[in-house]
Image: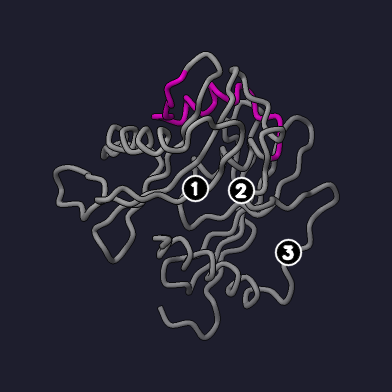
């Protein structure tokens, strides 16, 4: 049973409210491309800097946060958002994910959000295997993602990066590459679904955010705050 309560709700809001926000989805500029769902990309869509044979992105929930420690739910369950490459043993990998999850559930971890109105938190974990290792490893900060990617050279790498550094309710929609700069179009929906923003963020190939440009910032007509 999936636990994507908040994320699924926001994605549904995004689809419905974008239709209300405009008669049509935004008209893409020349050479602007719409992102595919993350799980549609393959290993060949990434140009990784290390000799990595497997890469995955998983999502899991914690128990209610009491203000002291984050703890995994028992039994440990997760959803796979991305899985590319060769994995030798799913059974061993499941235990490895639980171990890495326990190590990563800290207050200062970068890729998490609270699932309001509950006290549970959603964590996103990026795991990988290197060819020379039999041990699964986990990314602990944003810099380590860039260490693996080295440079952002592909659409899949760009989507992975912008998802990692943005808020849960901010959805990357499309991108355009020009003059060594990626321009990414985002939509951001408020939690109550009554407010929507459309904006561009510009990144270089090292993943640095160069600037942000607001396109539209509107309240949805007939929506009660």
Q: Which residue is mark 1?
A: 80
Q: Which residue is mark 3?
A: 26
Q: Residue 216 colored magenta?
A: no
- Mark-to-mark CA distance, 2 and 3: 23 Å
Q: Residue at x 32, y 34 (%)?
A: 104
Q: Residue 154 colored magenta?
A: yes
Side of 145 relative to 179 (left or right):
left
Of labels 1 and 3, the one closer to you: 1
Q: Residue at x 84, y 47 (%)?
A: 31
**What is the crowding at mark 1: few (fewer than 14 residues within 10 Å), some, or many (at least 20)?**
few
- Mark-to-mark CA distance, 2 and 1: 9 Å
**What is the crowding at mark 3: few (fewer than 14 residues within 10 Å), some, or many (at least 20)?**
few
Q: Are marks 2 and 1 in contact (CB under 8 Å)?
A: yes
Q: Are marks 1 and 3 in contact (CB under 8 Å)?
A: no
Residue segment shown in magenta:
134-155
Find residue 146 and report its horizontal and vertical position in percent: 54, 26
Disc on res. 13: none
Q: Which residue is mark 2?
A: 39
Residue closest to the eye, 224 or 73: 73
Find residue 119 and report its horizontal and vertical position in percent: 24, 58
Which of the two discs, 2 and 1, labels the residue nearer the N terminus? 2
Residue closest to the eye, 88 or 157: 88
């Amino acid at each position: 049973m999936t636990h994507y309560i908040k994320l699924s709700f926001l994605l549904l809001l995004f689809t419905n409210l974008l239709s209300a926000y405009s008669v049509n989805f935004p008209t893409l500029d020349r050479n602007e491309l719409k992102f595919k769902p993350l799980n549609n990309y393959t290993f060949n869509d990434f140009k990784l800097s290390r000799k990595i044979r497997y890469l995955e992105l998983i999502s899991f929930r914690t128990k209610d946060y009491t203000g002291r420690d984050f703890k995994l739910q028992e039994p440990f369950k997760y959803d796979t958002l991305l899985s590319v490459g060769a994995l030798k043993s799913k059974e061993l990998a499941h235990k490895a994910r639980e171990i890495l999850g326990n190590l990563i559930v800290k207050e200062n971890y970068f890729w998490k959000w609270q699932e309001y109105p509950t006290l549970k938190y959603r964590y996103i974990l990026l795991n990988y295997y290197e060819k020379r290792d039999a041990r699964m490893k986990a990314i602990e900060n944003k810099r380590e993602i860039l260490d693996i990617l080295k440079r952002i050279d592909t659409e899949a790498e760009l989507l992975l990066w912008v998802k990692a550094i943005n808020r849960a309710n901010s959805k990357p929609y499309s991108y355009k590459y020009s003059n060594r700069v990626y321009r990414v179009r985002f939509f951001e929906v408020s939690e109550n679904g009554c407010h929507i923003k459309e904006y561009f963020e510009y990144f270089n190939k090292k993943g640095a955010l160069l600037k942000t440009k607001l396109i539209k910032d509107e309240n949805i007509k007939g929506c009660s705050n």
